[in-house]
Amino acid sequence: MDIQEVLFYVLSVLALAGALGVILSRNPVNSVLFLILTFFSISGHYILMNAQFLAIVNIIVYAGAIMVLFLFVIMLMNLNADVEPQKNWLVQLAGALSGGILFLVILSAVVTALRSLPAENIDGTQDIGLIQNLGKVLFTDYVLPFEIASVLFLSAMIGAIVIGKKDPGLPAER
Amino acid sequence: MPIQYYLFLSLALFCIGIMGTLMRRNAIIILMCIELMLNAVNLLLVAFSKMWQDASGQIFVFFIMVVAAAEAAVGLAIIVLMYRKVHSVDINILNRLKH
């Protein structure tokens, strides 16, 4: 087993353990920390595949901004393990079962389809993930979605601020 | 690594995200499981983009991250607004639109 396989298995175990920790932990702050662990291991997978730009953007955007936002909101509401509501165990079992059955169904479909796929190996020796090559494709073929993404961000920012504003005290109805 | 390994890993992460969305009652945890599902799809897209030597997969991952960030911000704003009204993030309480 060469170093790439070992790294792949270590990162996969970390990602799956983090994902299980997200859904199984009582304290929401622990869930956020497990999700940050998952994001870091997925970024490790990206570096293994030589997708350098996406690895860094994943860490900066997801683990650095979105998860910090989640932590702010959780601490604003002062959620901890005592006040955490729980579904009754039958509903939880049904949820886990449906997720497991979906996993088995898609797994069998994928294994059947994979027999006709060439067994390509993904490794970190191609140049596709480098930022120069990605930038060339992004700014020539996909420049319109890029501009629309900026408009999307503007609208999301305005929307979030308008939704989160406090009511300045509406006058009482007559 | 052969593509099958990435396929299985991404599928497992996606199904764990679905299980979390169905099993938890806290609205913030449900949003986090949705982010987990989006990341599973991102991983698979990058793996296939490497396999077919096509940069479009990674560009699409970039746009998925854009949409996920915007959606997380607006979703959290809605949750904060709800919390101000009912002082809980339990989705069974947020379930009733008429009260």
Image: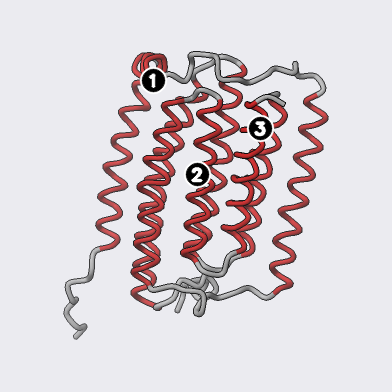
Element type at mark 1: helix
Residue A102 locus on image (x, y percent): 74, 48
Q: Which amino acid does label 1 sit on?
A: Ile
Name the residue tied to disc 3: A6
Name the residue tied to disc 2: A39
Q: How far apart are marks 3 and 2 (CA)?
A: 19 Å
Q: Are marks 1 and 2 on the same chain?
A: yes
Task: Provide the chain ID for the residue under circle 1.
Answer: A
Residue at position x 63%, y 61% from top? Answer: B22
Residue B78 locus on image (x, y percent): 37, 62
Which residue occupies the foreground of this view, A29 or A74?
Answer: A29
Q: Which amino acid does label 2 sit on?
A: Phe
Residue at position x 74%, y 46% from top? Answer: A103
Q: Which mark is drawn over residue A163?
A: none
Residue at position x 78%, y 25% from top? Answer: A114
Number of the front mark, 1 or 3: 3
Q: Are marks 1 and 3 on the same chain?
A: yes
Which residue occupies the foreground of this view, A144 or B67?
Answer: B67
Can you say whether A90 is above or below A103 in the image? Answer: below
Residue A147 locus on image (x, y percent): 30, 28
Give the crowd class for mark 3: few <14, some 14-19, many >=20 residues within 10 Å.
Answer: few
Q: Distance between the residues labelled 1 and 2?
A: 20 Å
Q: Which mark is drawn over residue A131?
A: 1
